[in-house]
Amino acid sequence: MLAMGLLLAGASTALIFGLLHRSLTNAWVKYQESLSNEAESRLADMFVFVDLSQLWPLLVALAFVMGLLGWLLLDSVAFSMSVSVLVLTVPRLLLARAHAARKYTLDRQLPDALRILAAALSSGSSLSTALNVMAKDLNPPLSQELSLILREQRVGIPLQSALENFRLRIRSESVAQATTLLRVGAESGGSLALLLDKLSLNLSEQQYMGLKVEMLTTQGKMQAWVIGVLPLILLGVLCALDPNAMQLAMSNVIGQVVLVIIAVLELVGLLWLRAILRTVCN
């Protein structure tokens, strides 16, 4: 009976570890595929083409090294795992930030570009000629997008489809308004220059109001920085005042759990405040 019990216990343990290993492996593969697909899509939208299959092992190695350093510094498994997970999530955050910055820059360029396009059409230039000149004279990222629209036209893609592709790449309200106006104007004709000039004025006013809202929410952003940095400062002060007690807290399971809970609550607070600021800005 004892042997049978030990055998069943060993089989159950092996089954549990096997299922856990399979679940973790599947989750890891899904995360890798999700991150790779998202990174390729965002980098392609920014006209950056990189072989991510060569960068992924470097990211994993960096996460392992940083986690090992965290464990050597604080002798805390929870802190080490948190550092490794943070390193693995940082690229996605950086890509999202770079994509948002590119979108913001393009939106800021759009009103002046529409005024230039309206002036060119008023002087008798065709839409394709005006877009070609703007693609050469304007700064990235708008010049890159206009160049891609012209290249798509050269290979036989209609202007309406090229403009729709531009709208889908950027997914901006300003770009959606501009591309819709250009598509309707190209199909029906009419005083496209006057409409572009009015749209440029409207977009400029919207951006001005957006800047005012951004100025009013600067205080909230500063509060987010304080919420995020102040606990780290207090932790450093406590480590300097009583390093033995802090070392005991970090090496104890209960202390590690408390630190993880604090980190999670800090993250929730930052995300909550960020959502509030986004709602106000939008």
Image (cartoon, grey):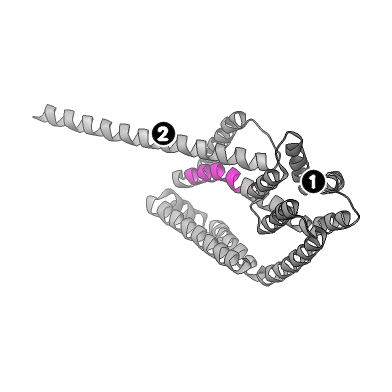
Q: Is residue 114 above or below residue 144?
A: below
Q: Give left or right: position of 48 versus 78.
A: right
Screen quadrant of the C terminus: bottom right
Q: Residue furthest left?
A: 1
Residue 159 is left or right of residue 87, and the answer is right
User: Which element carries disc 2, helix, strand or loop?
Assistant: helix
Residue range of the region highlighted in magenta in the rendering: 80-94
Q: Quadrant location of residue 165?
A: top right
Look at label 2 and name its amino acid: Thr
Residue located at (78% from left, 55% from top): 109
Mark number displayed over residue 46: none
Query: Taken as a whole, is the magenta stretch helix, strand or loop?
Result: helix
Q: Where does residue 153 sit, x and y in percent of width and height?
A: 75, 39
Give the mark nearer the N terminus: 2 vs 1.
2
- The answer to whether residue 259 of the structure is visible from this angle is yes
Q: Residue at x 80, y 57 (%)?
A: 114
- Left or right of 204 in this view: 41: left
Q: Read off the residue under disc 1.
A: 143
96 vs 148: above or below? below
Residue 81, x across and y down, in percent: 47, 43
Q: Could you classify mark 1 by the number of other residues whose Cα lies within 10 Å: few (under 14), some (14-19), or many (20 or more)?
A: many
In whole angstroms, how far apart are the C-alphas of marks 2 and 1?
43 Å
Percent position (x, y) of residue 233? 59, 60
Q: Tell me the residue that label 2 is attached to.
A: 25
